[in-house]
Amino acid sequence: MTWSATARGAHQPDNTAFTQQRLPAWQPLLSASIALPLFFCAGLAFIGLGLGLYYSSNGIKELEYDYTGDSGTGNCSVCAAAGQGRAPPPPCSCAWYFSLPELFQGPVYLYYELTNFYQNNRRYSVSRDDAQLSGLPSALRHPVNECAPYQLSAAGLPIAPCGAIANSLFNDSFSLWHQRLPGGLYVEVPLDRSGIAWWTDYHVKFRNPPLVNGSLALAFQGTAPPPNWRRPVYELSPDPNNTGFINQDFVVWMRTAALPTFRKLYARIRQGNYSAGLPRGAYRVNITYNYPVRAFGGHKLLIFSSISWMGGKNPFLGIAYLVVGSLCILTGFVMLIVYIRYQDQDDDYEE
Amino acid sequence: MVKEDETFPCDLIFLSSNRGDGTCHVTTASLDGESSHKTHYAVQDTKGFHTEEDIGGLHATIECEQPQPDLYKFVGRINVYSDLNDPVVRPLGSENLLLRGATLKNTEKIFGVAIYTGMETKMALNYQSKSQKRSAVEKSMNAFLIVYLCILISKALINTVLKYVWQSEPFRDEPWYNQKTESERQRNLFLRAFTDFLAFMVLFNYIIPVSMYVTVEMQKFLGSYFITWDEDMFDEETGEGPLVNTSDLNEELGQVEYIFTDKTGTLTENNMEFKECCIEGHVYVPHVICNGQVLPESSGIDMIDSSPSVNGREREELFFRALCLCHTVQVKDNDSVDGPRKSPDGGASCVYISSSPDEVALVEGVQRLGFTYLRLKDNYMELLNRENHVERFELLEILSFDSVRRRMSVIVKSATGEIYLFCKGADSSIFPRVIEGKVDQIRARVERNAVEGLRTLCVAYKRLIQEEYEGICKLLQAAKVALQDREKKLAEAYEQIEKDLILLGATAVEDRLQEKAADTIEALQKAGIKVWVLTGDKMETAAATCYACKLFRRNTQLLELTTKRIEEQSLHDVLFELSKTVLRHSGSLTRDNFSGLSADMQDYGLIIDGAALSLIMKPREDGSSSNYRELFLEICRSCSAVLCCRMAPLQKAQIVKLIKFSKEHPITLAVGDGANDVSMILEAHVGIGVIGKEGRQAARNSDYAIPKFKHLKKMLLVHGHFYYIRISELVQYFFYKNVCFIFPQFLYQFFCGFSQQTLYDTAYLTLYNISFTSLPILLYSLMEQHIGIDVLKRDPTLYRDVAKNALLRWRVFIYWTLLGLFDALVFFFGAYFMFENTTVTSNGQIFGNWTFGTLVFTVMVFTVTLKLALDTHYWTWINHFVIWGSLLFYVVFSLLWGGVIWPFLNYQRMYYVFIQMLSSGPAWLAIVLLVTISLLPDVLKKVLCRQLWPTATERVQNGCAQPRDRDSEFTPLASLQSPGYQSTCPSAAWYSSRSQQVTLAAWKGKVSVEPPPALSGSRHHCSSSPSHSCPGSRVQLLV
């Protein structure tokens, strides 16, 4: 024995549970008896959740209007026709009239939607300079090359904000008017244009360059606005907290959409009499029609939507949960049948 | 000049040594695996030259044959020109040739002249270049890779083509909001298309799992440590554990279909032991206990039969003298040398060394019986007889051993002037030459011993008168100097001399089987592996060993394909006859693999010898050789065991090659311990060396080395099995997770105008394979044990479940790929419908494309990791840590990555994306939903397959998971079920046997205590239950 004890020398491997592959382990097995209750439970839970989601989504109202201006679809067709083949199109206004038979439960959000617009195109989506947008003075003067062909103006000045995304900033504007009584006056409904961008984008990611002599305009001196813009960036809004790179419309636009059909938040309606929603009555939306979409076969839509805890109207999640839940239950039953039959056979064999 | 313990640098003709008699000893352990010392003789005319000047003055020419690989054949002639005289012509044989690679022993220095050098040496001619070995898994991996490469290229092509079709309308190619630069516009269309194609290739390149190769290498490297660490494979006696020389072939151990094993030293211990002798029908057994140590007080012999008469006593002494004299053993006096064995007689410190361990065993055995061989001095052999008198015999002639005659003789002259010829050899070569003696009794004894696996030799003698002896001398001299056909002439001369012998008796030497060799072979055969024994040994001994280690069973019908038979009939006839026998039978067999093992079925064992094999392998002019090969293979395939004896090292490799390249391309494993097995070890898919007595040549050239043959069982059945399932899961999983990863990107191209927009952020693209999903699979592939180690060892048949690359078949691969595609569709379209036309936050804000990608990515990371969790059967704390840890790491990383503005990045697209996503309730719900949908089909498939078509493995798992408390019903003797029980019964009964096996351990003790009730109970049980009435089990029970 002593001999064998001494032989356990240098070559002798360590005898630990790990080296001997004998670590204590939980050895679960995905057998029918475990899977069956799992399937039923998951199925029931999913159906319950699905129903909740479905009804919650159904409770959301949406009102949308295509104001692209295809001929015979309302008075925006005039603007569309006027803008045909001209760049930049001349300023034009049109309106959308609608009436609400009952209260449009609030809070109401106003979106615009573009279709067939590829914000996710690679060349388009890289055409920006985040350093410039974060207010870095050096980047302001020297936009990155990705911004080309919107990097430098024809005069050789750096464009601020540079790039295709900024250049194609959505520039239609809307105002909402409410006529409480038939034939009465239209009262403007206040649109809250703040808080439409991500808090972090507005407060952290986008910064104006440091003011020169207290003036934003001077800070931007020596730069050119994007070619499609009518106004320089520091005149986007009279509100100093909403102009320059931190203009909320601009920030919203700069968050490129995932899909070619996308919505962007335009305004929230939550002030005054309209905090509970839009009361019944006739409404008019004045549209400043600038943005050309017919050139690429796109459409422009205007959407009023209410919001719940789960966001806008989207029945997909609820339906998907319902379908998966019922599938779980169904397969659960199929497996139960298989299981019972198999058990019988098993018993037969063993007897 | 070569000094002691040096190896010869080239093939030399031995001119002289510092020993007076012109001999030297060499060991050829590195050449043919024989560690014993061999005597070589200097050329007669030059053996007197002892200084360099002498050698310098020698004037001679040497003629020799063209280099050939046979180690033991050499024919040449030396013409020594001494002054004025005619040249003296001397023959040169292999005894004059010192081979490169051999080592000089016991001789201070020798002089030699080089004849073959470099690549012409016999060693070089026998050397087989080590080729790169790649495992079957790696091959299928590469095949899969090619498929994925095709997918990648076709994806890129499809997208490029679609892009240009889609862009044919100018407003899509260049809408006003996304104008190109001037240089972009001017670029050539084809150049643009080509760069687009390349860009798509870059975008989709992650589908080629480059990281898989890294992980596989790591898995193999780290995994091989588990083999080295395994305590079960550590041999306490030698203090050696298993060695892993290559880690590339771990999983191949789980795929072995053919094992080619050497016999001596591998199956057996290569530790000869004199067991008994039989003189005139009386059996003598030396007192032997524990490993050959003689009891100190007993130097006598134990007689089993009645005491011999006076005449008998004379014969007995003659027999012992014969054994003492008829050998080529040398005695080494000092014990400092690494002689193979020390004399067990404690007093005399002399060591016997010989080219044949049998001879040593015999001489030692006789020593124990009272006759001690002392030394060979000046051609006189001295021995010490029972009365402690020294007897001296003049050694006149040695008729050395060769494998064709299978006997050797010595002619000695006793002190009294009588000349004896003692002849010792295999029974078959002695009996026909015997004219006197108790042939029948001895033959019976010899046969009995042979069946027991002992190596038997017969001893006979003849008294010669002076005239006869002179005639013999002439005959031999004439044969020895012949240059042409010397061998043949010598053989003829021997033939003439060794006849009319008087049979003295027989000896039996045991080469003990290695511990558990039979058990191991049985287990391997049950695992569906065909075991072939390739040995240089002679047929009878080899066959006996095969019986002893249960390679051949009692009911095995042996088919012989030997030189003897081929001499009788033509090779053609023999082959066709054999194949007819085999095929007629196999016609009645069912085609499944199990039939080969069933107890009631006839199974065949084939014995073939080297000469017959070379006939089969020899290419023929008319090109019919391939026919023979095919036929031979066909026969071999139908045999449950094949024994190839009298194999040269290269022939062993040839056999392996033959099987390796046969139709089915089976995976072969060669195991051996000697240098003669090296070529076979190198040739086979997996080469295993047994760290044995014959040097470490085999171990060094092998892929794995194990201390004992029995370790092969754990090596294959446990480690091989584990590694195979681990790596196959690893490979499939890697392809799967990369499909999951890249296919959404592909789909996204349809929604971003084929603009090569990435769906995921760069950090995610980079880290997906490196950190988010790498560790769980690596740890899985190191730790997974789908079944316990003990179950695998107990039930070798489970090995069949993974045979023939079962887990990497195309069907499985397609399943995984489709699963990946399905999951990718779920991720992408799930997120797509979530994001379509709506907001998913409660504050109405809209998410952008990076949130979309991050959602897809999050679902993916969770799905892919949980999929692995579903596949894990063995959850140690490490698995828990790694799986949950890497999910946690993903979350933490994402929070961090999105939580800070990183100064070194010129874009901040991920800023707060992940956190914003988590702030949205529907995103959470979507993650849960999509992960569930993705995993659902796989769970469903697993559960249904387990219920409806369970594999043997799954049955065992079920059995382990739900131990049925029916122990009382099962009788312990179920453990005695023959393999036939499992194979011939319907699978259901087989299943029940599985659950019984689980309960066995507890019962074993009881069996020994009270066998009768157990036996009767089991009989009752067997007859009452239909599922247990398998013929195999009944037979076993009643034995």
Image: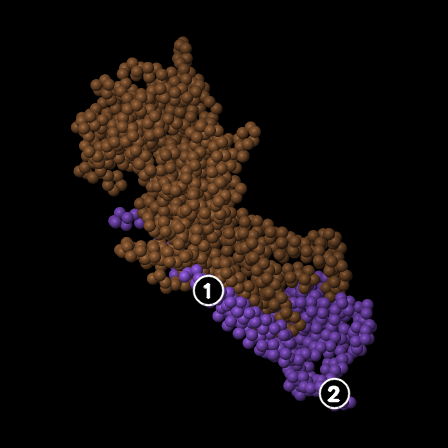
Residue receiving disc 1? A344
Residue receiving disc 2? A179
Looking at the rendered structure, the secondary structure element under dot 2 is strand
Q: Residue at x 38, y 33 (%)?
A: B538
Judge from the rendering whether residue B20 lies leftward or rightward of residue B164; answer left or right: left
The answer to which quarter of the image holds residue B414 is top left
Q: Do the residues labelled 1 and 2 touch (CB within 8 Å)?
A: no
Q: Colour of chain B?
A: brown
Badge 1 crowding class, 10 Å Cα cut-off, few under 14, some 14 to 19, many 20 or more, is: few
Pick whichever, B24 or B610, lies toward us: B610
Q: Which residue is drawn at 24% across and 22% down?
A: B393
In the rendered image, residue B726, in percent from the top left (x then y), is placed at 47, 54
Amino acid type assigned to the residue bearing label 1 in the image: Asp
Looking at the rendered structure, the secondary structure element under dot 1 is helix
Nearer to us of marks 1 and 2 is: 1
In the rendered image, residue B603, in percent from the top left (x then y), is placed at 43, 43
Q: Residue at x 70, y 75 (%)?
A: A112
Q: Which residue is drawn at 37% across and 56% down?
A: B1023
Note whether A55 is above or below B427 in the view shown. below
Q: Colour of chain A?
A: purple
